[in-house]
Structures are given as C-alpha cells and as structure tokens.
Amino acid sequence: MKLSKTYNPKIVEEKIYKLWLKSGFFNPDKLPERHKKPYAIVIPPPNVTGKLHMGHALNAVIQDTLIRWKRMQGFKALWLPGTDHAGIATQNVVEKKLKKENLTRFDLGREKFIEEVWKWKEKYGDIILDQLKKLGCSCDWSRTRFTMDKGYSRAVKEAFLHYYKKGWIYRGERVVNWCPRCSTSLSDLEVVYIEEPTEMYYIKYGPITIATVRPETKLGDTAVAVNPKDPRYKKYIGKTIVIQTVLDKAKMKVIGDRAVDMSFGTGAMKVTPAHDFHDFEIGEKYKLEKKQVIGPDGRMTKLAEKYAGLTVMEARKQIVEDMKKIGILEKTEPYTHNIARCYRCNTVLEPILSKQWFLKMNKLAEMAKKPVKDGKIKFHPKSFEKSYFDWLKNIKDWCISRQIWWGHKIPLKEEKDVLDTWFSSALWPFATLGWPASASNLDNFYPTDVLSTARDIMNLWVARMIFSGIEFMEKIPFKDVYIHSTILTKEGKRMSKSLGTGVDPINLVGDYGADATRFGIAYQIMGGQDMRFIKDNIVMGKKFCNKIWNASRFVLSQNPNVKIQMSNQIHWTQGGLPGGLHPKSKFTNADKKILKQLEKTTKSVNNDLENFAFGKAAHTLYDFFWHDFCDVYIEEFKKQNNKEAQKILFYVLSSSLILLHPFIPFITEEIYQKLPIKNKKKCLMIEEWPKS
C-alpha cells in the first residue's frame, strides 16, 4: 500500500481519530484480552468556561503520552476526562453575558440565573474537551464526568455530611478574603497578590506613632501592639493611652506581643481585629472588641460615622485630608505593597469579619503528610515536597462556603451558601469512578496511578485530594504526582490572552498539525519549572513528521510484497532476532549498528518515560530516527539493498513507529495501517510495546 506524496495532517488526523473512536480502544473495557492490569489517570478537570491554552496542551501531551505508552505495554489503561463547574469563574462569565443585555443576576433572581448558567454550560461547557480531541487525546469519552452531574452531586453531599457529623465542619465568624464585586469569600489560595505602589502613612497615636498603608481601617482599631522586647515601648505595655482620631478622642490599650515585627514601620502596630488576619488572631488572644468599619459592599459602615457609605478609596482620601487638618499625620512615604486581588475579576479584596463554614484541618493535614513522608506518594520533581509540607505545616481551617449562586448548595436546611469549588474537586479521583453509589470502576481503577498538574494548584487541589482519598476511600488517590513546567513566552513573561501574550494551541494544530504541535511541546519538556515557549520547535515538529513520512514512503517502495513479523523482543544481541529474519542471516556492520542503536534507544525511552523525562525521550527518538536511521542506515541500505536488509529496514521503521506513537499518534497510526505486517493489530495504539 502506498503513501501519498506529501503528508496532509488535516486529512489524516480527522480520519485517524474516527478510526480510534470506532475501535473503542479508548475504553479500557474494550481492549484486547492481554490488557489486564489496570492503569488510570484522571484528567485535571478544566473549567467549563475555558478554551485550551498552552498549559492545558502541555498537560494533555504528558498524560496522553503516558496513557498510550501504558496501553501499548498491555495495561488496561483508562484516561478519565471531565470538566469542573468552576463556581466563581462560570458565574462571572454568565454575568458578563447578562451585562451586555443590561441585566444583572439580581434582576433575574437566583433560580432563573442558575437556569441561565446551565444553558451556558450546555452550549459552551464542552468546548475544551472537543479541542482535546483535536490534539489526539485518547480519553475514554464514555466516562466523561462533570462536577455537578447527578452522581457527582451526590458524592459532594455525602462528603459534606460525613465531615459535618464528625464535627469537623463548623460555622464561625472569622476574617476572610472578601471580593466586593463577586460578593463572596475566597480562600487564601484564590487570592492573587500584585505588587503595586502606594503610601505608608505615619500617624500619631498619643505618645506612640504607628505606620500603616490602610488609614481607613484606623476607625476599626481596638488596641495598639508592640513587641515586649522593644525598649522604645516597654513602659507603655499594659497601659491605656488616649489618642486623637478623625472622629473624636479614644482610649486604646497597649499590648505586648512577640508576633509584632520591631523592624516594620515604627515597630508599633494598630490592631484592627475585624479587617486583618493577623490582627484577628491577636484580637482572639487578648479578647479585643471587633469593630467592622468596611462592609461586604466595599463601603464604609455606620460605625465609620461621617465616612459611612464612602468606598474604601474615597474614605482613605478623605481621612488622610482630615488627619492633616488636625495634625496627627506625621508624614507619608512611597511604599510598594502586595495588593490582594480576586483571582477571577481582579477586584481589590477586603479582609472583613464574616460568618462562614469552615472545615477543621489539623487531622486532615496529618493525613495528607503521611503518605508523602512514607514514600507511598512521590512528587516529581522531588523538590516540590518541601513547599507541600510547608503549606500543610502552616495550614488554617479551610473556609469552604461561598456566597455566590452557582455551585453545590450546602446541604443543610435554610442554608443558601454554596461550597468552594475545590471542595468538590477534592473528591475527583474517586467521585468520578462512582463513589459512593457504585464500586465497579473503583475496584478496577482506584487508586489511580499518576496525577499530572501545575504547581500553582498543588496546595489548592493535590493536598486536598490526598486527604480526601484517605478519609473516604482509606487509600491514597494516586502514587505519583508530576508537577509540569509553567509555559512562558519566549521573553519569559506570563502567557495571558488579556495581555496579548497567549498562544492558542488549536491555531498551532491548524497551522502545523496535531503531531507537530505535540512533538514540539514534548521536545521542550527538559526538567525546568519554567518553559519558554519557542514556536521554532513546532516548526521542527512539522519537519520531523515530513521526514518520517518521506522515509516511510521510501521503505514501502522497496518491496511492497515483503511481510514482516513484529516482535517485542529487542535484545537481538542476546539471541533474539527481528521478526522474519532467519537465525543464519548475515548482518552487515550497518545492520548490526542500527539494530544495536534501536535496542539502546528503546531502553533509553523506556527509562525516560518511567522517570517522566518526556523531553529527553523526544530528543532521543528524534536523533535516532533522523540521524541513525535516515541519514546513516537508509543511505547504507541504498548501497546493498538485499532481502535481509529490506526486512531490517521494515523492522526498524515499524519499531520506530511504535516508540514514536505516544508522542505523535496520528502520523504513526496512518503509516502503520499501510505497513505489510503479519497478524497486524486493528490499530497501532494497541500494538505491543518492546520490552527492555
């Protein structure tokens, strides 16, 4: 069978993906009998708001490479896909849509707004899954899950009530990150800190001067704190001082606490328990009054008296002017400050006192630590274990309630709040497999094998999945955690659509083909945690595909009637021979060299994939095929061209296609379908991987 003169990825990719879907082999239950031992990966569920970006594409290439490799090794391989309802993110998208129609969610009311979100989800929610198909992902689409489908919702309810009955979920009043625009609390891990210029204000507090970047919260102060070791303030500790404020004179107790940083500002700090996390802890410790002067709407409350109703920035400006007038503002200095912003809408957050639902974390944190300490769960690279343990060491109770409308409603009577998106995501490895209703998939595929994810959600998601798996399944959810690189621009900047620095991987697929895009991405995975994306590597991937195509056309043109026998035995130097070759075959030096190099390449690729060294494996395969096979052996073959060499030529090509398949599945499958192989499998994707 002949190959066309040129390789056209658009035609081939569509045809081959249909072949794969028709075969049913993405579903592990439909794999041939030799596929017995389970191997599973659950996809980090992309948001239903999203389209494929380079981070998604990178992770998809990694996961599909592993799944295809394991499937060819004879594993009953499952790659389970799905999407996340993405609470705030999805609600924001729909609110933006309504804004164009001059409507708000409040105009619709909760029930109708949620109906609108479901309509949006049905229309746009699976875009990213369709794009993953274009990239060649071999997920079992029949098992696709959504974090708000009926079965998953049952799992979330079960998990909440389990914790609630144990007394680990409680309602309490604490300072939380609050987004005035989204009207909801956020966890610490959903906050984006952006360095911005501001002012440091030095304010007279009677005999003491304090320094602050937030003079508007001064109205909520209930104490002054100093370090007991600070000689400047020892005489004031335990005493009450009289201070002048922009409202009136006030009495303030001076507290001695070792948590106060003597080197910051003046070494004395105002304590505002209702509007600062650190101050809240001091307030609890010393039983201080909590005066909330900023409300959930981002405006000053009645306690702010004449400033009530002003926005925070309006109040700051007015208060500074008033402090100048009464002579209590000593000076101001330029200061660079980390401003907390909402990770979804970029609004400046307000730390405010709020009644929320919390999950106690002390015992769960210990659960999450143990399997990593014991080596039952391994991080790759191992260096990420430190930041993982650091976060768990300093963990606070998890604020799991959100005041938005889209999400899993807290399953208690008269409760309107919904659960943090990450509460439901924490159940992903087992809820997707049927927990708590069904055990069949759980028995076969839990625990899963590998989790591949980005470093920015390591604590948001990975730690929570680990303790959830142990708490509900009494088993760890996965054995290996691969933290992949973060893709930056060529100049080292963050990729962002809004900043115009993003690269659309689907456009790359359209311009260069899925295989070229996949190989170009894999080629750049060289172990660093920041990957500067270079489009030249995608171009290289296209040239490499063309090289494979042209070399295959040459091989097929030599003897279209030859039939080769595939063999997964690569140790020909130890007595094994490539399929179809006679034990008395006479090998030339060129024959021996290419077979030895094939054996070496196979061992190297197997070792690299075992150790998640995807880039190294891609480089090895590229060098072997382009240089050892094409540049050297094919040229030597042209000089000798005998029947034995023809068999080696076909054997090395077919073996190369197997090794390359996990990285570039479309072109390798298309060529495989044309090869004259005895007892050919229905698809290359289930061909036997060589043993090393």
Image (spheres, rainbow, N blue to C red):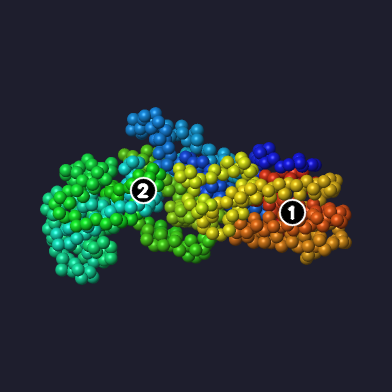
Q: Residues within 10 Å of mark 2 (few under 14, many from 20)?
A: many
SS class of the residue under badge 2?
strand
Farthest residue, direction top:
101
First in sequence, mark 1 or 2: give its number: 2
Q: Give the residue at x 48% y 61%.
A: 384
Label 1 CA crowd tier, 10 Å (few <14, some 14–19, many 20+): many
In whole angstroms, how far apart are the C-alphas of marks 1 and 2? 53 Å
Question: Which residue is nearer to you in this view: 254 or 441?
Answer: 254
Q: Amino acid at mark 1?
A: Ser
Q: Position of residue 24 (x, y in %)?
A: 65, 41
Q: Is residue 612 above or below residue 124?
A: below
Q: Using the image as rendered, state which of residue 507 and residue 655 is in the foreground.
A: 507
Q: Residue 118, how many percent across, how many down?
A: 45, 34
Q: Nearer the viewer, mark 1 or mark 2?
A: 2
Identify the residue position indicated by label 2 in the image. 341
Q: Which residue shows up at 37% across the image and 53% down it?
A: 195
**Are the two marked residues, 1 and 2, in contact with CB atoms closer than 8 angstroms?**
no
Quadrant of the image containing the N terminus: top right
**Residue 422: x %, y % from top left:** 43, 48
State the residue position of label 1: 655
Which type of secondary structure does the marked residue at label 1 adopt? Answer: helix
Image height check: is 8 above or below 656? above
Residue in the picture at 19% in, 55% down: 329
Q: Position of residue 162 (x, y in %)?
A: 40, 49
Does residue 470 appear in this view? yes
Report the amino acid beneath label 2. Arg
